[in-house]
Amino acid sequence: MPPQPRQPQPQPLPLPLPLPLEGITVVAVEQAVSAPFATRQLADLGARVIKVERPDGGDFARGYDTAARGLASHFVWANRGKESLALDLKDPRGRELLEELVRDADVFVQNLAQGAAARLGLDAAALCARHPRLVAVDISGYGPDGPYAHKRAYDMLVQCEAGLVAVTGTPEQPVKAGIPAADIAAAMYAFSGVLAALLRRGTTGRGGPVEVSMFDALAEWMGHPLHHGMHGGPSPARTGLAHAVIAPYDAYPTAGGTPVLLSVQNDREWRRLAEQVLKRPELAEDPAYATNVARTANRARTDAVVAEALAALTAEEAVARLEGAGIACARLNGVAELAGHPQLAARERWREVGSPVGALRTLLPPIGLPGGKPPRLGPVPALGEHTDALLEALGLPEERITALRREGVIR
């Protein structure tokens, strides 16, 4: 056999590797949480994100509260690393300036009220028709059509429509999730949709529209109770901290009153719990407890025997015994305990970012890219902080910028 030609060996890239989205420019007409949180993920990964805000107050999330040393906590969380351009899009001159920015952008994201973007010519379909390489994202409450298309879609309302509230809370009281779950779900699907569309553009040269609705995103997250209920099982009951189809799975008070949570996922774990934690090995074989189906059917009795054993232990003793037996467990932490959590401290997850009020503590993004540059944790922008620089980069002379500001088109 003749010798085979040697294949060229890939040359190692210099370290650290660049951030994946370096060189990508994102223009976002965004407000509240869903679009800002999506574009913040892009900024963390190296994209340049230009946030377009109204001159008269900007993103209304700026006014939600003043908890972050005078800034709104939602806004600080979702808007680090962006450039703020205060621009009136109702004015034709403002739309003309935005069009110039979009012409050189890679990604456009908007979550205006349903129909508003189309009236301005900023819906994804229209933008992609004018700019074939652009990835344009429409984030809406319920999607572009159907009977709910124009329904107002705030997070709590979508949680209710999607059934999340019906399965969250106690048997007596349904409650919404304590975080904006519908907004976050839509944001993360928009984020992944942008990445997928950019990958496709790399092979086809074309961008294209991306469509995400809060309702569709949260309906997907309701997959377990949805499939449980629509394929023959009963609709999952609200069980507080317990699990609708697994037992024991709940919080149990300890000797000092501090609750400890535990979860038994299978019958092998139940055997270890009975023998090593409850000190009642006979329960491992008892037909009333030996299988998860039996334990769930006898939930009150199951919970009672677990509660009796843990009530005799301090929280520290209970956690030590559960961990020694290989049983998943946790403490019921509040926000203060999360902020001081030893796992976050040990893994050095905290950083500081700049803001109009000085340095603010923030978490690293969950996506780790070992061997690459650290995530880009830029400052939280003041309203219109980058307006002049962005317009100067478009070639506008100083006198025109001054005139636009005087006439309220920019801030």
Image (cartoon, rainbow, N blue to C red):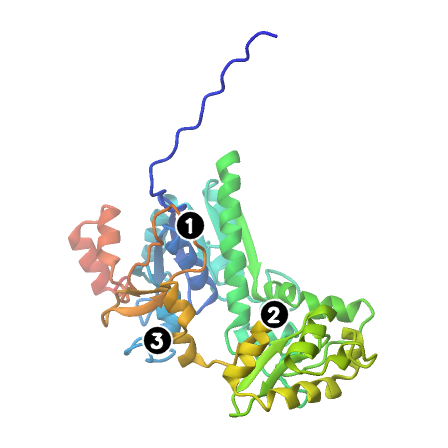
- Disc on res. 72: 3
Q: Position of residue 38 (x, y in %)?
A: 46, 59
Q: Is residue 274 visible?
A: yes
Does residue 22 sit above or below 84 in this rendering? Answer: above
Badge 3, how many Cα within 10 Å: few under 14, some, many 20+?
some
Residue located farthest toward the left when viewing the structure as drawn: 399
Q: Is residue 120 visible?
A: no
Q: Which residue is mark 2?
A: 326
The amino acid type, in three-letter code, at marker 2 is Gly
Q: How many marks?
A: 3
Q: Position of residue 372 (x, y in %)?
A: 37, 46
> Residue 230's quadrant in the figure?
bottom right
From the image, which quarter does the C terminus lie in? bottom left
C-alpha separation, residue under disc 3 versus residue under disc 2: 42 Å
The amino acid type, in three-letter code, at marker 3 is Ala
Work out whether mark 2 precedes mark 1 in sequence or the reverse, and give the earlier one: 2
SS of the residue under disc 2: loop
Q: Horizontally, is 130 left or right of 51 in the view?
A: right
> Residue 361's quadrant in the figure?
bottom left
Could you say which is closer to the camera, residue 392 or residue 66?
Answer: 66
SS of the residue under disc 1: loop
- Disc on res. 227: none
Could you say which is closer to the camera, residue 224 or residue 180?
Answer: 224
Badge 1, how many Cα within 10 Å: few under 14, some, many 20+?
some
Q: Horizontally, is 235 left or right of 160 in the view?
A: right
